[in-house]
Amino acid sequence: MAADPFIGWMTDIQQRVERTLEAALPPAEAEPCALHQAMRYATLGGGKRVRPLLVCAAGEIVGAAPDNLLRIGAAIEMIHAYSLVHDDMPCMDDDVLRRGKATCHVAYGEANALLTGDALQTLAFEVLATPLPGVAPAEQLAMLATLSRAAGHAGMAGGQAIDLASVGQPLTLPELEFMHLLKTGALIRAAVLLGARAGTPLPAERLARLDHFAKRIGLAFQVVDDVLDCEADTQTLGKTAGKDADNDKPTYVSLMGLSEAKRFARELRDDAFAALADFGPAAERLGALADYIVARSF
Amino acid sequence: MAADPFIGWMTDIQQRVERTLEAALPPAEAEPCALHQAMRYATLGGGKRVRPLLVCAAGEIVGAAPDNLLRIGAAIEMIHAYSLVHDDMPCMDDDVLRRGKATCHVAYGEANALLTGDALQTLAFEVLATPLPGVAPAEQLAMLATLSRAAGHAGMAGGQAIDLASVGQPLTLPELEFMHLLKTGALIRAAVLLGARAGTPLPAERLARLDHFAKRIGLAFQVVDDVLDCEADTQTLGKTAGKDADNDKPTYVSLMGLSEAKRFARELRDDAFAALADFGPAAERLGALADYIVARSF
């Protein structure tokens, strides 16, 4: 039986992302050990690495250097990992299980988890501030500006703040979409855009089309997450299932119903595909990745 | 009576830093309001702005553009402000009073305080990633690398992790110095170095001398803080006094005694001054600032 070449590519990238993160994280045996161990615990050995995969697939379109793409992907993955550590803390979602193991604050204590998230965010910017061979410093500076906007008050952190304020509130669909556009969408978009800026420059119009693709996929990713949270049991999911419904958080499933949410995810995927149509074979991987992300729940 | 020109300069810079922070922070009335208001609450209207003052004074040596120095100073001050917000949280120092007002988590709740610190750190990097007129992008990238190293696991966050692990532990003086070199020293050094890199490039040897100056001042700053924490009452200090002793945290005063700690602070200041000797009148302001920082406790 021939192996699926897309799965082969994905597995290869996941392994190389893991090695890149390994090398960029501080060694576990160096002082302060608890911080370094917790940073590694929260980042290594788990996760689907969706954001680095998007960086690499988008980078293929512009012929970017693979090592640069891995470094950009590792930086974005550190931002993602920091957000999970802080999101799981008692004052936020108060979750005890993540990727099938104890959450960071359960394993290392709350204070260390706080510092771990902080230091992971800082390290993400340090990794992206280290010169990328062949990339113009001005372009790299623009990448840093894009990533920081995507992660901050107008992006991921802002989305979390809206999420926080929305517990027990009846959100409308547009409000829910705005929240997710920031909370998970901003970092997904940054992944695609940074990958697409790491090689031969694209015309603004084509970059905008990739951005539209990323927006749709980011939203699809969230709808699928809501579907999974509703359908899966805790063991399959590797995190506490049914958490959102328990917390009375608005989700696509609670607002649309399960089958309508699945239909919406497929619609978003099709719209994303349409945005890739003009890119030809160079964007095949990105399309396959979008399909893979959305297909998780069907 | 003629006004002291140094105090005049300081007041002017403090006001301009305030306006720079005002403009860089998200508006209070924009969604998510709670996050934006808490970010402004934690950053504006308080603090001595020691780090931006150091940026500006160091920048005078190399003839850097004042607006660039203010932007760099604002970025470093945001890192400082984020660290205070997280440091005050219940799982860390559990402090209720900061700069004479309720700490961020008391005023806005724990979850918002967590996100506020996170978003302030992100905004610091966004501010520093926005092109500085007249500064080469490669140089600005190097500034971002310096600031991220100073703030992360090998700098401020690492120092906080050591501090955390040291509660109730008998630290030696070298261990205490190492902790402070990271916890407060790293950001003070970054302030001086970023200011000194914002204008006409300095030879490496002179940059190293400024770094030595910054190291000594950073340590002196901490020794003075310990002295103040021991001597001052809560009202004068604007934060809860005697907190470190209550928490059984090692301090310079607890290890050296009060008068020896004061003598040590003066020795550090003199050593810092010696490192500035060759710079002539261009470094007068930096020297006066060092004197001001250390003189607080005498």
Image (tube, coloured by chain):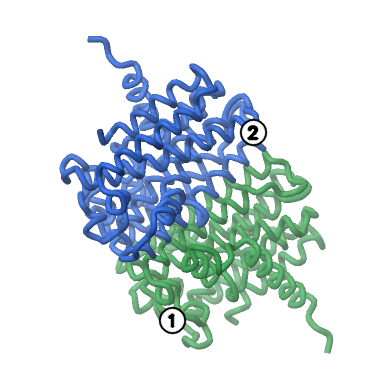
Chain colours: A blue, B green
Whether callout 1 and callout 2 share a subunit is answered: no
Q: Residue B66: image x %, image y %?
A: 76, 59
Q: Residue A251: image x %, image y %?
A: 31, 52
- Residue position for label 1: B240
- Tell me which residue sits at (45%, 75%) in the image: B103
Q: Which mark is residue B89?
A: none
User: Marks 1 and 2, how far apart in space?
Assistant: 54 Å
User: Which residue sits furthest right?
Assistant: B2
Front of the two marks 1 and 2: 2
User: Which residue sits furthest top?
Assistant: A1
Chain of residue at mark 2 = A
- Tell me which residue sits at (75%, 60%) in the image: B277
**Quadrant containing the C terminus of chain B in the rendered view:** bottom right
Q: Is residue B200 above or below residue B297?
A: above
Q: Is residue A30 above or below residue B169?
A: above
Q: Residue B222: image x %, image y %?
A: 52, 69
Q: Is residue A278 above or below residue B229?
A: above
- Tell me which residue sits at (65%, 53%) in the image: B193
Q: Quadrant of residue A49?
A: top left
Badge 2 crowding class, 10 Å Cα cut-off, few under 14, some 14 to 19, many 20 or more, is: few
Q: Is residue A272 left or right of residue A170?
A: right
Q: Amino acid at mark 2?
A: Ala
Classify mark 2: helix, strand or loop.
Answer: helix
Question: Observer-nearest residue: B149 or A261?
Answer: A261
- Tell me which residue sits at (46%, 58%) in the image: B118
Q: Which mark is residue A204?
A: 2
